[in-house]
């Protein structure tokens, strides 16, 4: 029984405690478990005084972590094998690094402990209860790192399992209290990480991070030469966080600061803590550009004319960095993240790199410079130089980059995978740049990060990973995911990606498994909604106000997600609420509020145009939501007496070009006179799907714009919503009552009468059809009759055409409604594997439901297929119409805006086929000139703004049953949605909602 309990506790708590790690701690005793804390007594921790200072620091942080969980602090002391304190300790924990700690080396020698699984393995660790570790010591728990960070990661791993989040300071996650902590005798272990250098880049730190740091880490003035607030008080917090999430590498903030100049302790302490420093892709040789160059440079930043000065500038960078573990950026870009001038040529750049190598040779005498970690980042135009033939020595890591919007431009192709320096990835979660900055709240889906970064693993770009995280907050979870995935990529796959978020939620907010899952769903929804279009790109007509109920449904989905987040929030303790607000509830509420504000503004504008008094309520709503937006920002800034003041300073409305505006502005709203009667009477009739309104002339009623007939709408049997609506509203100051009366029994109204007044100026009436009573197309008249005091009664018919489309009883599949067959790509009727490759769903990915992609990506030896030979997906559909009734349909394919990242000779392609017609193969991503973006990528309506790329083909498909088939041509194509246009597709942002499926 006892046993059973311990096991249950381990199972119940294990997953939540250390995301993605095997767990060895438990909170219930078992006969063999070693006690870290029990019965109010804590173990004693021993390190060696020749241990790395960073390990000693992590060990003392481990002590405070155990204290915050249990209220009891283990003691910590330096010891040798002979120390009395070690011999008399009841539960000694011996921590040390192989080959560094004389204490741990003695344990290994004496106990003959087999450390071969970690010896010489970068950042690996093992832990174990060891009998007779040293003469006279009966038993100890030993924590052994293969190197400095191996020991540090082992300690922080234990902290996390014990109940201290890596974000305890950065997101105020409270420790989970426990009375006892035990460890299984077999301990924990971890081999070398998948990615050797893993970390993040603070960037574009104005206005949020910099103003916050100035307030929290300085007396208001910042560093002497730069005014930067990023001193070692700030950075040591960041170093600790980096290590706690199992990262090891940082690019420091660069725009108004110079890491090594602002505070001479910065670089020393990074190394002391155990963090490898680098500089961004445009800052060679460990010097900050533009700031340090601005301070100390003389002459132009131009190697052609000023090489002597620049050379020495770099020499000083290397001299300053060489005592510390560093990863050197090589190459050169223009000053301020810009391309070098027009005269730059490959020969000059190759000379630059060769001079930089000379500096290493001179500054590291006796060292083989190929062992000094160096990286050359192929960012934008630099990738162009590479494409045009520029090469660097083989030991320099080639860092491939995304398009700044999360789509990798390139991965190493087969011939590039055997370089000794390997390859890496520079990725973005945050951007200042075209088409729009995106910096405000989390707008990246981890499913997308997984899709892109698992390809980096497959294609061996695993030497260095760095992600641009802007201000770091509020991108906490996705930052941890990026680093954690690099730490152990084997742990995460398409089937368990959700458990990253649910275990994260359990760890951060002390939730049970059920609520953890709910948070995973909230986060999946939130990031889907914010990724389908970055908040900075929203406007009042992003989502269609007239077609497919799109705007309303987007708002409703946000509302449901917000309610779900509120439910979780309300059950948390005060301390947990603070963390939950930062990590989940704020972005949900903020995203909901902003989207709702834009949608309400669009609806206001439309209703005002239609002379509907209800526009005024929406104007009020827009104003209220605009205030709520600031309230939420203020609430964030007021948490814990202002601990995170300024962190949400980023403006987020009315970008007119890529750069941020200096202030948030409210969308324009319009009002309808509430004092004047409408000149066409009291009642306005507005059918779904049009900007027209009746009575009175309106340019959208008919092409003339005057003398138009009454409204007419059509409903067929397979329209996904199953109804149409008519909004009945006041057109001005006159209240009225109305009736809605169909002239036939098959036409149904959701309400047959209503009474409208200033406080309730509008009512929505849904029209539906009793299909059992309709054959073919029949027309009903729905009479809307208004009665108002003082004016004569008014009536208007709405003509409803009910088109009873039917499919043969044997048909299964998607059925046309509304002139389209819309299909989520994951809902295939058949899925055919070829070899080991199968089209596989990536859940919670993309703009609507998910994506499908051929899996595994290295299948078929990475070769491509000709259309008709590879893995395929089939979708059975039934149509009643064709375009112009001429026998053709067009098939529009919605794919992720992935680049031709497998090299120019292997562009992404997909085969599309209808029935037995010839498959049409499309290579959909245009190849830009080297280092450039294709024009379709950019702009407010381009690939990345819309976060989708679509292409289409025409096929013959006379009314009846058909099969649409997708053929794999190339790996790494992700299909999200398919829209077959039979003549009725209308403009919208997300495309028509999914059609009815008969199964
Ligand atoms: C152990 O020794 C090191 C090096 O002398 C010292 O910095 C550290 O503070 C000592 N630790 C403890 C816990 O006494």
Image (cartoon, rainbow, N blue to C red):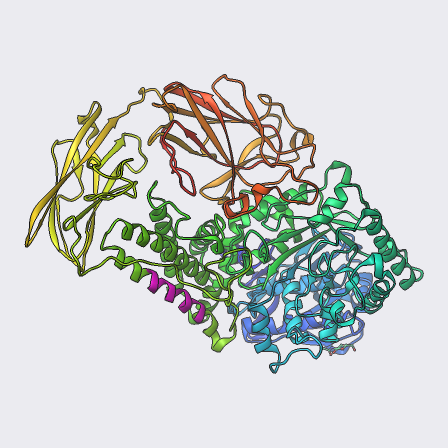
- Residue 304 place in picture, x, y as percent: 84, 56
Between 109 and 998, the residue placed more toward the observer is: 998
Image position of 350 (left or right of 457): right
- Residue 979 place in picture, x, y as percent: 43, 32
From the image, which quarter does the C terminus lie in?
top left
- Residue 607 place in picture, x, y as percent: 28, 51
Query: Does the segment drawn in magenta span residue 99?
Result: no
Q: Is residue 131 visible?
A: no
Q: Residue at x 61, y 67 (%)?
A: 35
Between 724 and 469, the residue placed more toward the observer is: 724
Residue 83 quadrant: bottom right
Total number of numbered labels?
0
Query: Does the segment drawn in magenta span residue 627?
Result: yes
Q: Main secondary structure of the magenta part?
A: helix
Q: Quadrant of ligand 1?
A: bottom right
Residue at the bottom extreme? 219
Residue at the top extreme? 916
Residue 86 quadrant: bottom right
Q: Is residue 714 visible?
A: yes
- Residue 252 place in picture, x, y as percent: 68, 65
Instruction: Please state the extent of the stretch shown in magenta in the rendering.
Output: 622-634
Q: Residue at x 71, y 57 (%)?
A: 126
Between 217 and 742, the residue placed more toward the observer is: 742
Q: Residue at x 65, y 44 (%)?
A: 409
């Amino acid at each position: 029984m006892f046993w059973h309990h311990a096991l249950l506790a381990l199972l119940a708590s294990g997953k939540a405690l250390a995301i993605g790690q095997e767990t060895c701690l438990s909170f219930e005793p078992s006969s063999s478990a070693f006690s870290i804390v029990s019965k109010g007594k804590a173990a004693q921790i021993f390190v060696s005084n020749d241990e790395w200072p960073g390990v000693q620091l992590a060990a003392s942080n481990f002590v405070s972590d155990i204290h915050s969980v249990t209220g009891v602090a283990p003691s910590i002391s330096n010891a040798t094998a002979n120390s009395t304190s070690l011999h008399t300790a009841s539960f000694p924990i011996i921590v040390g690094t192989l080959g560094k700690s004389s204490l741990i080396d003695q344990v290994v020698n004496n106990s003959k402990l087999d450390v071969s699984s970690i010896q010489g393995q970068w950042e690996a660790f093992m832990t174990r209860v060891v009998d007779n570790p040293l003469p006279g010591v009966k038993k100890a728990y030993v924590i052994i790192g293969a190197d400095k960070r191996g020991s540090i990661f082992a300690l922080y791993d234990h902290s996390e399992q014990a109940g201290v989040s890596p974000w305890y300071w950065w997101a105020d996650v409270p420790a989970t209290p426990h009375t006892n902590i035990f460890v299984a005798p077999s301990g924990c272990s971890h081999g070398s990480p998948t990615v050797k250098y893993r970390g993040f880049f603070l960037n574009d730190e104005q206005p949020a991070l910099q103003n916050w740091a100035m307030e929290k880490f300085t007396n208001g003035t910042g560093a002497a030469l730069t005014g930067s607030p990023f001193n070692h008080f700030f950075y040591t917090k960041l170093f600790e966080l980096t290590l706690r999430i199992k990262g090891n590498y940082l690019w420091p903030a660069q725009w108004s600061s110079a890491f090594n100049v602002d505070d001479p302790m910065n670089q020393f302490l990074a190394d002391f803590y155990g963090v490898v420093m680098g500089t961004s892709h445009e800052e060679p040789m460990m010097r900050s550009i533009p700031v340090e160059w601005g301070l100390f440079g003389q002459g132009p930043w131009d190697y052609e004319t000023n090489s002597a000065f620049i050379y020495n500038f770099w020499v000083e960078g290397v001299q300053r960095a060489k005592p510390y573990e560093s990863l050197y950026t090589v190459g050169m870009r223009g000053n301020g993240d810009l391309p070098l001038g027009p005269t730059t040529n490959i020969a000059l750049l190759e000379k630059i790199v060769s001079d930089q190598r000379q500096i290493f040779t001179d500054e590291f005498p006796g060292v083989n410079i190929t062992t000094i970690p160096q990286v050359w980042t192929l960012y934008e135009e630099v990738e162009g130089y590479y494409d045009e033939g520029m090469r660097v020595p083989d030991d320099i890591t080639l860092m491939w980059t995304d398009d700044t919007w999360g789509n990798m431009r390139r991965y190493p192709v087969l011939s590039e995978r055997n370089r000794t320096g390997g390859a890496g990835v520079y990725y973005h979660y945050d951007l200042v740049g075209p088409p729009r900055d995106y910096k405000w709240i989390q707008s990246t889906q981890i499913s997308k990060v997984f899709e892109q970064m698992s390809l980096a693993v497959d294609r061996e770009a695993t030497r260095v990973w760095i992600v641009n995280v802007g201000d770091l907050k509020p991108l906490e979870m996705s930052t941890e995911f990026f680093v954690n995935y690099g730490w152990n990529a084997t742990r995460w796959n398409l089937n368990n990606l959700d458990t990253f978020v649910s275990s994260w939620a359990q760890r951060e907010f002390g939730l049970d498994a059920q609520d953890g899952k709910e948070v995973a769903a909230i986060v999946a929804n939130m990031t889907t909604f914010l990724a389908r279009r970055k908040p900075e790109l929203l406007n009042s007509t992003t989502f269609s106000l007239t077609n497919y109920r799109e705007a309303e449904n987007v708002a409703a989905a946000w509302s449901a997600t917000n309610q779900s987040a509120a439910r979780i929030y309300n059950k948390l303790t005060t301390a947990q609420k603070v963390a939950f607000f930062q990590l989940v509830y704020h972005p949900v509420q903020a995203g909901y509020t902003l989207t709702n504000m834009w949608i309400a503004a669009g609806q206001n504008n439309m209703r005002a145009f239609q002379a509907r008094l209800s526009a005024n309520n929406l104007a009020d709503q827009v104003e209220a939501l605009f205030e709520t937006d600031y309230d939420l920002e203020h609430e964030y800034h007021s948490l814990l007496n202002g601990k995170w003041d300024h962190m949400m300073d980023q403006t987020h409305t009315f970008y007119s070009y890529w750069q941020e505006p200096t202030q948030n502005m409210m969308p324009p709203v319009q009002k309808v006179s509430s004092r004047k009667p409408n000149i066409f009477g009291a009642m306005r009739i507005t059918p779904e799907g049009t900007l027209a309104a009746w009575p009175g002339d309106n340019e959208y009623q008919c092409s003339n714009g005057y003398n138009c007939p009454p409204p007419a709408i059509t409903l067929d049997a397979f329209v996904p919503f199953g109804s149409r609506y008519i909004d009945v509203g006041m057109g001005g100051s006159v209240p009225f009552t109305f009736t809605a009366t169909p002239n036939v029994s098959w036409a149904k109204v959701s309400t047959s009468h209503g009474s409208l007044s200033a406080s309730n100026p509008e009512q929505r009436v849904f029209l539906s059809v009793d299909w059992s009573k309709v054959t073919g197309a029949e027309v009903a008249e729905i009479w809307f009759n208004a009665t108002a005091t003082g004016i004569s009664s008014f009536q208007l018919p709405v003509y409803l055409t009910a088109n009873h489309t039917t499919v043969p009883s044997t048909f299964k599949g998607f059925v046309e409604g509304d002139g389209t067959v819309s299909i989520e790509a994951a809902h295939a009727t058949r899925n055919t594997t070829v070899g080991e490759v199968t089209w596989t769903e990536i859940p919670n990915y993309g703009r609507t439901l998910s994506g499908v992609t051929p899996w595994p990506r290295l299948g078929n030896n990475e070769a491509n297929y000709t259309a008709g030979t590879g893995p395929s997906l089939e979708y059975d559909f039934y149509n009643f119409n064709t375009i112009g009734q001429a026998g053709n349909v067009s098939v529009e394919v919605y794919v992720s805006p992935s680049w031709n990242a497998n090299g120019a000779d292997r562009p992404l392609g997909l085969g599309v086929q209808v029935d037995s017609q010839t498959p049409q193969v499309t290579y959909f991503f245009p190849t830009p000139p080297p280092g450039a973006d294709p024009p379709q990528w950019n702009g407010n309506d381009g690939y990345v703004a819309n976060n989708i790329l679509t292409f289409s083909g025409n096929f013959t498909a006379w009314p009846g049953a058909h099969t649409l088939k997708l053929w794999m041509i190339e790996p790494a194509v992700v299909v999200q949605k398919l829209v077959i246009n039979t003549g009725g597709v209308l403009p919208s942002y997300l495309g028509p909602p999914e059609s009815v499926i008969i199964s």
